[in-house]
Image (cartoon, helix red, strand yellow):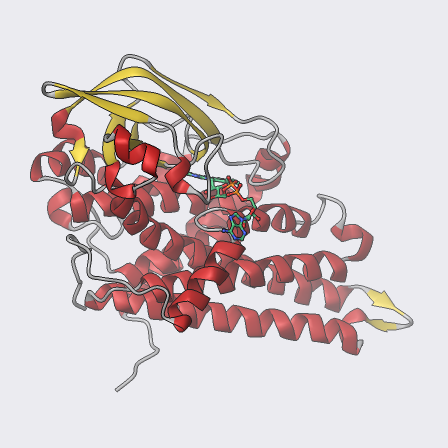
């Protein structure tokens, strides 16, 4: 039988994240956003709530919650601000869950445990100045020398780049395959900020997610021990794509929260503002925008929850997660545009939150697979140009 009810644990998690973000972050977010300031004090607070290791099993220092809880937390965090959800996306989704599935026991002890406990912050470095959607175009190389690799390259547009401790980095280990753009020549590594030759910077020209940190990092002949190779040599591209299945899931759920935030702000405003002698909510064209937000919210929520359910039962979900991410992010852009519209000129001022929602939503239509890349993927599944084989490593299923 189908069951759309949340479990007690899921409801409690949803409630506690909602309360924490509403009480601790919502009152300050406008100032943080205005000042382009990332507030590091949210890390210990998120750690105390168990969020930094939310779906990591207790044996690796995590809260041991299921993947639906990860989605619920993402939705609640982005309801308040996208920068909060981004922390879950890169630290938990892209990095820690990838180590959980692909890491050695030694890597889990050395990296996953402190990350899940929140004493170390982690992120994911695939994008480079000349390669985003076209991940085979990356130029970073890892040259093997005995029991070490020497990494040289530059990553850009990396969330938390200037504040993280640990980086999941993708580089070519086979230079012939690099020339042929054969992705089986790519490998994945754990790189620490503390390694010699590593440097990072913050991107200061960004116009959205201003309360978040986005930056770049450079590796100049950074020596990485062989024990930090994730998976086997040549599995890097597969690992990068596996990580995106988890990151995209949090992005989908987060965008769903943003749609809900647009809906709630619009309903409130539509009942306060009057034109032509009546509340603007009584105009049919305003109702249409609000109704569309509700439809987009409910549809997006069903889509990410289906993907979360598939993760819980241990089934491949690249297709479903991609659809959820594509739909919810595009819908969030529609919702944020209409929320500004409903607020009229007030929506064009940062006295109201909807302008921030409008700036923040666009990033997610670009990162973790652009709108166009996701469209192509969904069409390719239907046309039979694309199918998924089981990866060598999978997320552990969870039972409720
Ligand atoms: C706020 C923010 C945070 C980010 N965080 C991270 C992070 O933590 N880690 C990380 O590795 N990266 C991160 N990124 C980078 C992000 O993943 C890339 O920007 C994204 O993959 C797109 O790459 P690009 O910007 O190089 O655009 P391009 O790939 O150059 O694309 C430009 C345009 O061309 C279109 N296009 C490209 N190829 C095709 C095609 N085959 N068919 C049709 N259209 C196409 C795209 O859809 C897009 O509209 C972040 C980006 C942003 C904005």
- Asked which quadrant contains residue 5, the reply is bottom left
295 to the left or right of 146? right
Q: In this orientation, which residue lies closer to the viewer: 275 or 332?
A: 332
Q: Percent position (x, y) of residue 31?
A: 61, 35
Residue at screen point 15% across, 20% down:
148
Determine if residue 107 is in view.
yes
6 to the left or right of 28? left
Residue at screen point 31% across, 49% down:
241
Image quadrant containing the N terminus: bottom left
Position above or below: 32 against 144: below
Q: In this orientation, which residue lies closer to the viewer: 299 or 48?
A: 299
Q: Percent position (x, y) of residue 90?
A: 36, 42
Residue at screen point 34% across, 33% down:
179
Q: In this orientation, which residue lies closer to the viewer: 57 or 248?
A: 248
383 to the left or right of 22? left
Residue at screen point 32% across, 71% down:
6
Q: Of all residues shown, which one is farthest toward the right?
A: 276
Q: Percent position (x, y) of residue 366?
A: 53, 48
Q: Percent position (x, y) of residue 142?
A: 25, 25
Q: Of all residues shown, which one is farthest toward the bottom?
A: 1
């Amino acid at each position: 039988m189908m069951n759309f009810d949340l479990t007690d644990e899921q409801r409690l998690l949803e409630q506690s994240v909602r309360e924490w973000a509403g009480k601790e972050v919502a009152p300050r977010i406008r100032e943080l956003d205005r000042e382009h300031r990332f507030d590091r004090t949210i890390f210990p607070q998120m750690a105390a709530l168990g969020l930094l290791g939310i779906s990591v099993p207790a044996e690796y220092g995590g809260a041991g919650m299921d993947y639906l809880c990860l989605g619920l937390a993402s939705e609640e965090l982005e309801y308040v601000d996208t920068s909060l959800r981004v922390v879950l996306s890169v630290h938990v989704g892209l990095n820690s869950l990838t180590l959980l599935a692909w890491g050695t026991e030694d890597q889990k002890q050395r990296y996953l445990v402190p990350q899940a406990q929140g004493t170390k912050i982690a992120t994911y470095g695939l994008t480079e100045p000349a390669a985003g959607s076209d991940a085979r175009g990356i130029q970073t190389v890892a040259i093997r020398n005995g029991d070490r690799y020497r990494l040289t390259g530059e990553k850009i547009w990396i969330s938390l780049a200037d504040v993280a401790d640990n980086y999941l980095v993708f580089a070519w280990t086979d230079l012939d395959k690099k020339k042929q753009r054969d992705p089986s020549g790519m490998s994945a590594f754990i790189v620490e900020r503390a390694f010699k030759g590593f440097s990072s910077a913050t991107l200061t020209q960004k116009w959205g997610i201003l309360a978040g940190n986005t930056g770049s990092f450079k590796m100049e002949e950074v020596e990485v021990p062989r024990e930090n190779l994730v998976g086997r040599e040549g599995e890097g591209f597969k690992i990068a794509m596996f990580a995106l299945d988890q990151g995209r899931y949090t992005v989908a759920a987060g965008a769903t929260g943003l749609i809900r935030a647009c809906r709630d702000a619009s309903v409130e405003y539509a009942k306060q503002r009057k034109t032509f002698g009546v509340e603007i909510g009584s105009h049919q064209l305003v109702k249409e925008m609000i109704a569309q937000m509700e439809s987009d919210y409910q549809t997006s929520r069903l889509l990410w929850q289906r993907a979360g359910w598939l993760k819980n039962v241990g089934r491949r979900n690249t297709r479903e997660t991609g659809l959820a991410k594509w739909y919810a992010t595009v819908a969030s852009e529609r919702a944020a545009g209409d929320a500004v519209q409903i607020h009229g000129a007030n929506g064009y001022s940062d006295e109201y939150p909807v302008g921030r929602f409008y700036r923040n939503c666009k990033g997610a239509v670009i990162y973790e697979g652009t709108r166009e890349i996701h469209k192509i993927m969904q069409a390719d599944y239907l046309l039979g140009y694309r199918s998924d084989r089981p990866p060598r490593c999978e997320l552990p299923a969870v039972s409720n």
